[in-house]
Amino acid sequence: MTNWNVLAEKVLEGKELTDREALSVLESPDDEMLDLLHSSYQVRKHHYGNKVKLNMIINTKSGFCPENCGYCAQSRDSSAPIQKYRMMDKEQILQGAEQAHRLKSGTYCIVASGRGPSKRELDIVTSAVEEIKDKYDMKICACLGLLKPDQAQRLKEAGVDRYNNNINTSANHHDNITTSHSYDDRVETVNHVKEAGISPCSGVIVGMKETKQDVIDMARALKALDTDSIPVNFLHAIDGTLLEGTNELTPTYCLKVLALFRFINPSKEIRVSGGREVNLRSLQPLGLYPANSIFVGDYLTTAGQEGTKDHQMLEDLGFEVDYVTEEETVNR
Protein backbone atom coordinates (compact mmCIF):
# COMPACT_ATOMS: atom_id res chain seq x y z
CA MET A 1 0.00 0.00 0.00
CA THR A 2 1.34 3.41 -1.02
CA ASN A 3 1.57 5.98 1.75
CA TRP A 4 -0.31 8.80 0.04
CA ASN A 5 0.58 11.33 2.73
CA VAL A 6 4.27 10.73 2.08
CA LEU A 7 3.63 11.25 -1.63
CA ALA A 8 1.86 14.55 -0.92
CA GLU A 9 4.73 15.69 1.31
CA LYS A 10 7.16 14.88 -1.49
CA VAL A 11 5.16 17.05 -3.90
CA LEU A 12 4.95 19.91 -1.41
CA GLU A 13 8.73 19.76 -1.05
CA GLY A 14 8.99 20.47 -4.78
CA LYS A 15 9.96 16.97 -5.83
CA GLU A 16 8.50 15.22 -8.88
CA LEU A 17 6.73 11.88 -8.95
CA THR A 18 8.47 8.99 -10.64
CA ASP A 19 6.57 7.17 -13.35
CA ARG A 20 6.16 4.27 -10.93
CA GLU A 21 4.58 6.57 -8.33
CA ALA A 22 2.37 8.20 -10.94
CA LEU A 23 1.16 4.82 -12.15
CA SER A 24 0.45 3.78 -8.57
CA VAL A 25 -2.03 6.67 -8.32
CA LEU A 26 -3.97 5.52 -11.41
CA GLU A 27 -3.85 1.87 -10.33
CA SER A 28 -4.61 2.46 -6.65
CA PRO A 29 -7.29 0.24 -5.08
CA ASP A 30 -10.69 1.86 -4.75
CA ASP A 31 -10.70 1.19 -1.00
CA GLU A 32 -7.78 3.65 -0.70
CA MET A 33 -9.73 6.40 -2.47
CA LEU A 34 -10.44 8.54 0.58
CA ASP A 35 -6.78 8.44 1.65
CA LEU A 36 -5.68 9.38 -1.88
CA LEU A 37 -8.15 12.27 -2.06
CA HIS A 38 -7.14 13.52 1.37
CA SER A 39 -3.49 13.59 0.31
CA SER A 40 -4.18 15.38 -2.99
CA TYR A 41 -6.35 17.84 -1.06
CA GLN A 42 -3.38 18.73 1.15
CA VAL A 43 -1.53 19.86 -1.99
CA ARG A 44 -4.57 21.70 -3.34
CA LYS A 45 -5.21 23.37 0.03
CA HIS A 46 -1.60 24.55 0.26
CA HIS A 47 -1.99 26.51 -2.99
CA TYR A 48 -5.69 27.40 -3.07
CA GLY A 49 -7.19 26.88 0.35
CA ASN A 50 -10.92 26.10 0.14
CA LYS A 51 -11.60 28.35 -2.81
CA VAL A 52 -13.08 27.26 -6.14
CA LYS A 53 -12.88 29.17 -9.41
CA LEU A 54 -15.99 29.23 -11.61
CA ASN A 55 -15.89 29.36 -15.40
CA MET A 56 -18.67 29.62 -17.99
CA ILE A 57 -18.52 28.79 -21.71
CA ILE A 58 -20.35 30.40 -24.61
CA ASN A 59 -20.25 28.49 -27.89
CA THR A 60 -20.13 31.41 -30.34
CA LYS A 61 -19.89 29.26 -33.47
CA SER A 62 -21.17 25.70 -33.67
CA GLY A 63 -20.32 23.10 -36.30
CA PHE A 64 -18.83 23.70 -39.75
CA CYS A 65 -15.40 22.66 -38.46
CA PRO A 66 -12.90 21.36 -41.07
CA GLU A 67 -10.96 19.33 -38.49
CA ASN A 68 -11.46 15.58 -37.96
CA CYS A 69 -11.18 15.25 -34.16
CA GLY A 70 -12.73 11.92 -33.24
CA TYR A 71 -14.31 13.11 -29.99
CA CYS A 72 -16.01 16.21 -31.38
CA ALA A 73 -19.63 16.55 -32.50
CA GLN A 74 -18.61 19.62 -34.53
CA SER A 75 -16.01 17.73 -36.58
CA ARG A 76 -16.28 17.43 -40.35
CA ASP A 77 -16.60 13.65 -39.90
CA SER A 78 -19.36 13.83 -37.29
CA SER A 79 -22.98 13.03 -38.04
CA ALA A 80 -24.15 14.06 -34.56
CA PRO A 81 -27.45 15.99 -34.70
CA ILE A 82 -26.15 19.21 -33.17
CA GLN A 83 -27.28 22.77 -33.66
CA LYS A 84 -25.11 24.50 -36.28
CA TYR A 85 -24.68 28.24 -36.67
CA ARG A 86 -22.13 30.74 -37.90
CA MET A 87 -20.32 33.22 -35.68
CA MET A 88 -22.55 35.05 -33.21
CA ASP A 89 -22.67 38.82 -33.31
CA LYS A 90 -21.19 40.98 -30.59
CA GLU A 91 -24.51 41.54 -28.82
CA GLN A 92 -25.05 37.81 -28.31
CA ILE A 93 -21.57 37.46 -26.81
CA LEU A 94 -22.32 40.38 -24.48
CA GLN A 95 -25.56 38.70 -23.38
CA GLY A 96 -23.55 35.60 -22.50
CA ALA A 97 -21.23 37.73 -20.38
CA GLU A 98 -24.22 39.05 -18.48
CA GLN A 99 -25.34 35.47 -17.76
CA ALA A 100 -21.80 34.54 -16.62
CA HIS A 101 -21.89 37.52 -14.28
CA ARG A 102 -25.22 36.37 -12.81
CA LEU A 103 -23.77 32.89 -12.23
CA LYS A 104 -20.85 34.47 -10.32
CA SER A 105 -18.42 33.11 -12.87
CA GLY A 106 -14.95 34.58 -12.48
CA THR A 107 -13.96 33.61 -16.03
CA TYR A 108 -16.05 33.89 -19.19
CA CYS A 109 -14.86 31.56 -21.96
CA ILE A 110 -15.53 32.62 -25.56
CA VAL A 111 -15.28 29.53 -27.76
CA ALA A 112 -15.64 29.08 -31.54
CA SER A 113 -15.30 25.97 -33.67
CA GLY A 114 -12.83 25.85 -36.55
CA ARG A 115 -9.15 25.44 -37.27
CA GLY A 116 -8.51 29.07 -36.35
CA PRO A 117 -10.28 32.45 -36.39
CA SER A 118 -10.96 34.44 -39.55
CA LYS A 119 -10.36 38.20 -39.54
CA ARG A 120 -14.12 38.81 -39.19
CA GLU A 121 -14.39 36.40 -36.26
CA LEU A 122 -11.39 37.94 -34.55
CA ASP A 123 -12.88 41.42 -35.06
CA ILE A 124 -16.15 40.35 -33.40
CA VAL A 125 -14.40 38.73 -30.44
CA THR A 126 -11.97 41.58 -29.78
CA SER A 127 -14.75 44.18 -29.98
CA ALA A 128 -16.91 42.18 -27.57
CA VAL A 129 -14.03 41.62 -25.15
CA GLU A 130 -13.24 45.33 -24.96
CA GLU A 131 -16.84 46.08 -23.98
CA ILE A 132 -17.08 43.20 -21.50
CA LYS A 133 -13.89 44.32 -19.74
CA ASP A 134 -15.33 47.81 -19.37
CA LYS A 135 -18.58 46.52 -17.88
CA TYR A 136 -17.78 43.47 -15.75
CA ASP A 137 -15.09 42.48 -13.28
CA MET A 138 -14.37 39.09 -14.81
CA LYS A 139 -11.58 37.36 -16.63
CA ILE A 140 -11.93 36.56 -20.33
CA CYS A 141 -10.69 33.31 -21.83
CA ALA A 142 -10.80 32.80 -25.59
CA CYS A 143 -10.68 29.47 -27.41
CA LEU A 144 -10.70 30.02 -31.16
CA GLY A 145 -8.40 27.28 -32.45
CA LEU A 146 -4.86 27.58 -33.72
CA LEU A 147 -3.39 31.10 -33.56
CA LYS A 148 -0.74 33.06 -35.40
CA PRO A 149 1.48 35.38 -33.34
CA ASP A 150 -0.24 38.55 -34.61
CA GLN A 151 -3.66 37.13 -33.72
CA ALA A 152 -2.49 36.35 -30.20
CA GLN A 153 -1.23 39.93 -29.90
CA ARG A 154 -4.60 41.35 -31.02
CA LEU A 155 -6.40 39.31 -28.37
CA LYS A 156 -3.96 40.52 -25.73
CA GLU A 157 -4.51 44.16 -26.72
CA ALA A 158 -8.30 43.70 -26.57
CA GLY A 159 -8.06 42.50 -22.97
CA VAL A 160 -8.14 38.69 -23.24
CA ASP A 161 -6.65 37.33 -20.01
CA ARG A 162 -6.35 33.68 -20.94
CA TYR A 163 -6.32 31.54 -24.08
CA ASN A 164 -7.25 27.88 -24.23
CA ASN A 165 -5.87 25.38 -26.69
CA ASN A 166 -5.94 21.86 -25.31
CA ILE A 167 -3.30 19.29 -26.16
CA ASN A 168 -6.21 16.84 -25.59
CA THR A 169 -4.08 13.71 -25.44
CA SER A 170 -0.48 12.56 -25.42
CA ALA A 171 1.87 13.14 -28.35
CA ASN A 172 2.03 9.36 -28.77
CA HIS A 173 -1.77 8.96 -29.01
CA HIS A 174 -2.56 12.14 -30.94
CA ASP A 175 -2.73 10.65 -34.44
CA ASN A 176 -5.30 8.11 -33.22
CA ILE A 177 -7.61 11.02 -32.36
CA THR A 178 -7.04 13.52 -35.18
CA THR A 179 -4.86 13.85 -38.27
CA SER A 180 -6.01 17.22 -39.65
CA HIS A 181 -3.54 19.03 -37.41
CA SER A 182 -0.55 17.88 -35.39
CA TYR A 183 0.21 17.76 -31.69
CA ASP A 184 2.97 20.28 -32.36
CA ASP A 185 0.44 22.67 -33.92
CA ARG A 186 -1.37 22.82 -30.59
CA VAL A 187 1.82 23.27 -28.59
CA GLU A 188 2.89 26.06 -30.96
CA THR A 189 -0.35 27.97 -30.29
CA VAL A 190 0.18 27.69 -26.53
CA ASN A 191 3.66 29.14 -27.01
CA HIS A 192 2.35 32.00 -29.19
CA VAL A 193 -0.12 32.84 -26.42
CA LYS A 194 2.61 32.89 -23.79
CA GLU A 195 4.81 35.10 -25.98
CA ALA A 196 1.91 37.58 -26.32
CA GLY A 197 1.64 37.81 -22.53
CA ILE A 198 -1.66 35.93 -22.27
CA SER A 199 -2.13 33.34 -19.54
CA PRO A 200 -1.95 29.87 -21.20
CA CYS A 201 -4.69 27.31 -20.65
CA SER A 202 -4.33 23.79 -21.99
CA GLY A 203 -5.85 20.53 -20.92
CA VAL A 204 -6.86 17.02 -21.86
CA ILE A 205 -9.69 14.64 -22.60
CA VAL A 206 -9.42 11.36 -20.71
CA GLY A 207 -11.22 8.23 -21.84
CA MET A 208 -10.28 8.19 -25.55
CA LYS A 209 -8.74 4.69 -25.53
CA GLU A 210 -5.40 6.00 -24.27
CA THR A 211 -3.14 4.04 -21.92
CA LYS A 212 -2.40 5.00 -18.33
CA GLN A 213 1.08 5.95 -19.46
CA ASP A 214 -0.52 8.34 -21.97
CA VAL A 215 -2.38 10.00 -19.07
CA ILE A 216 0.88 10.40 -17.16
CA ASP A 217 2.56 11.80 -20.28
CA MET A 218 -0.28 14.34 -20.70
CA ALA A 219 0.15 15.62 -17.16
CA ARG A 220 3.92 15.88 -17.59
CA ALA A 221 3.58 17.64 -20.96
CA LEU A 222 1.38 20.32 -19.39
CA LYS A 223 3.90 20.76 -16.60
CA ALA A 224 6.62 21.27 -19.23
CA LEU A 225 4.42 23.81 -21.05
CA ASP A 226 3.89 25.61 -17.73
CA THR A 227 0.20 26.23 -18.42
CA ASP A 228 -1.59 28.22 -15.72
CA SER A 229 -4.92 26.44 -16.09
CA ILE A 230 -5.52 22.76 -16.88
CA PRO A 231 -9.05 21.66 -17.80
CA VAL A 232 -9.44 17.91 -17.32
CA ASN A 233 -12.28 16.67 -19.52
CA PHE A 234 -13.71 13.17 -19.33
CA LEU A 235 -15.01 11.83 -22.63
CA HIS A 236 -18.75 12.15 -23.08
CA ALA A 237 -18.99 9.99 -26.19
CA ILE A 238 -21.59 11.45 -28.56
CA ASP A 239 -23.46 9.34 -31.09
CA GLY A 240 -22.30 10.22 -34.58
CA THR A 241 -18.69 10.92 -33.62
CA LEU A 242 -15.79 8.58 -34.36
CA LEU A 243 -15.56 7.71 -30.65
CA GLU A 244 -19.27 6.88 -30.43
CA GLY A 245 -19.94 4.13 -27.88
CA THR A 246 -16.61 4.52 -26.07
CA ASN A 247 -17.22 4.04 -22.36
CA GLU A 248 -13.98 3.29 -20.53
CA LEU A 249 -14.31 5.47 -17.45
CA THR A 250 -15.55 4.92 -13.91
CA PRO A 251 -16.15 7.62 -11.30
CA THR A 252 -13.29 6.34 -9.15
CA TYR A 253 -10.82 6.31 -12.06
CA CYS A 254 -11.75 9.90 -12.90
CA LEU A 255 -10.95 10.89 -9.30
CA LYS A 256 -7.58 9.14 -9.54
CA VAL A 257 -6.80 11.09 -12.72
CA LEU A 258 -7.61 14.38 -10.97
CA ALA A 259 -5.39 13.42 -8.03
CA LEU A 260 -2.55 12.58 -10.43
CA PHE A 261 -2.85 15.94 -12.21
CA ARG A 262 -2.73 17.72 -8.84
CA PHE A 263 0.40 15.82 -7.81
CA ILE A 264 2.19 16.52 -11.10
CA ASN A 265 0.96 20.13 -11.45
CA PRO A 266 0.62 21.09 -7.78
CA SER A 267 0.29 24.88 -8.09
CA LYS A 268 -1.86 25.04 -11.22
CA GLU A 269 -5.58 25.57 -11.60
CA ILE A 270 -7.00 22.08 -12.18
CA ARG A 271 -10.52 22.32 -13.59
CA VAL A 272 -13.05 19.48 -13.64
CA SER A 273 -14.48 20.09 -17.09
CA GLY A 274 -16.62 18.46 -19.78
CA GLY A 275 -18.10 15.08 -18.94
CA ARG A 276 -17.94 15.45 -15.17
CA GLU A 277 -21.70 15.00 -14.80
CA VAL A 278 -21.90 11.75 -16.80
CA ASN A 279 -18.60 10.26 -15.63
CA LEU A 280 -18.23 11.32 -11.99
CA ARG A 281 -21.99 11.09 -11.46
CA SER A 282 -22.79 11.04 -7.72
CA LEU A 283 -19.09 11.46 -6.88
CA GLN A 284 -18.87 14.92 -8.49
CA PRO A 285 -18.30 16.73 -5.17
CA LEU A 286 -15.23 14.59 -4.43
CA GLY A 287 -13.57 15.93 -7.59
CA LEU A 288 -13.10 19.27 -5.87
CA TYR A 289 -10.70 17.84 -3.32
CA PRO A 290 -7.90 17.52 -5.91
CA ALA A 291 -9.32 20.12 -8.34
CA ASN A 292 -10.03 23.78 -7.59
CA SER A 293 -12.12 24.88 -10.56
CA ILE A 294 -15.29 23.89 -12.45
CA PHE A 295 -17.45 25.03 -15.33
CA VAL A 296 -20.96 26.23 -14.55
CA GLY A 297 -23.69 26.06 -17.17
CA ASP A 298 -23.56 24.07 -20.41
CA TYR A 299 -20.61 22.93 -22.48
CA LEU A 300 -20.17 23.23 -26.25
CA THR A 301 -22.68 20.65 -27.50
CA THR A 302 -23.71 18.91 -24.27
CA ALA A 303 -25.68 20.09 -21.26
CA GLY A 304 -24.02 20.74 -17.92
CA GLN A 305 -25.45 20.64 -14.43
CA GLU A 306 -27.90 23.39 -13.52
CA GLY A 307 -25.93 26.36 -12.18
CA THR A 308 -27.86 26.53 -8.93
CA LYS A 309 -26.92 22.90 -8.20
CA ASP A 310 -23.24 23.72 -8.69
CA HIS A 311 -23.49 26.59 -6.22
CA GLN A 312 -25.33 24.35 -3.76
CA MET A 313 -22.62 21.71 -4.15
CA LEU A 314 -19.94 24.26 -3.27
CA GLU A 315 -21.90 25.47 -0.27
CA ASP A 316 -22.47 21.93 0.98
CA LEU A 317 -18.74 21.19 0.68
CA GLY A 318 -17.83 24.31 2.64
CA PHE A 319 -15.94 25.80 -0.31
CA GLU A 320 -16.13 29.43 -1.38
CA VAL A 321 -16.04 31.07 -4.81
CA ASP A 322 -12.62 32.47 -5.69
CA TYR A 323 -12.53 35.89 -7.32
CA VAL A 324 -8.76 36.44 -7.12
CA THR A 325 -7.02 38.12 -10.03
CA GLU A 326 -5.12 36.19 -12.66
CA GLU A 327 -1.82 37.62 -11.42
CA GLU A 328 -2.56 36.49 -7.87
CA THR A 329 -3.43 33.00 -9.10
CA VAL A 330 -0.29 32.62 -11.22
CA ASN A 331 2.04 33.88 -8.49
CA ARG A 332 0.86 31.58 -5.72
Image: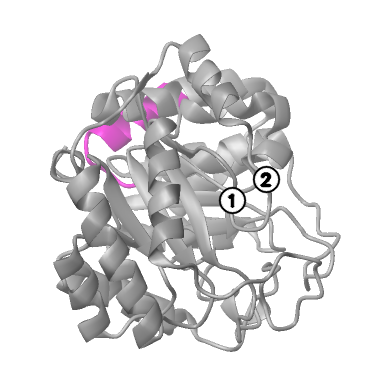
Residue at the disc numbered 2: 303
Q: Residue 109: x and y, percent?
A: 41, 54
Whether the magenta-drawn stretch holds residue 106 is answered as no
**Magenta residues, start to end:** 3-17
Res 318 visible: yes
Residue at the disc numbered 1: 299
CB contact under 8 Å: marks 1 and 2: yes
Q: Residue 230: x and y, percent?
A: 40, 51
Whether the magenta-drawn stretch holds residue 5 is answered as yes
Q: Is residue 74 above or below residue 306?
A: below
Q: Is residue 59 above or below residue 232?
A: below
Q: Residues within 10 Å of mark 1 (few under 14, many from 20)?
A: some
Q: Residue at x 75, y 82 (%)?
A: 77
Q: Residue at x 19, y 60 (%)?
A: 159
Give the quarter of the image for residue 313: top right
Residue type, numbered disc 1: Tyr
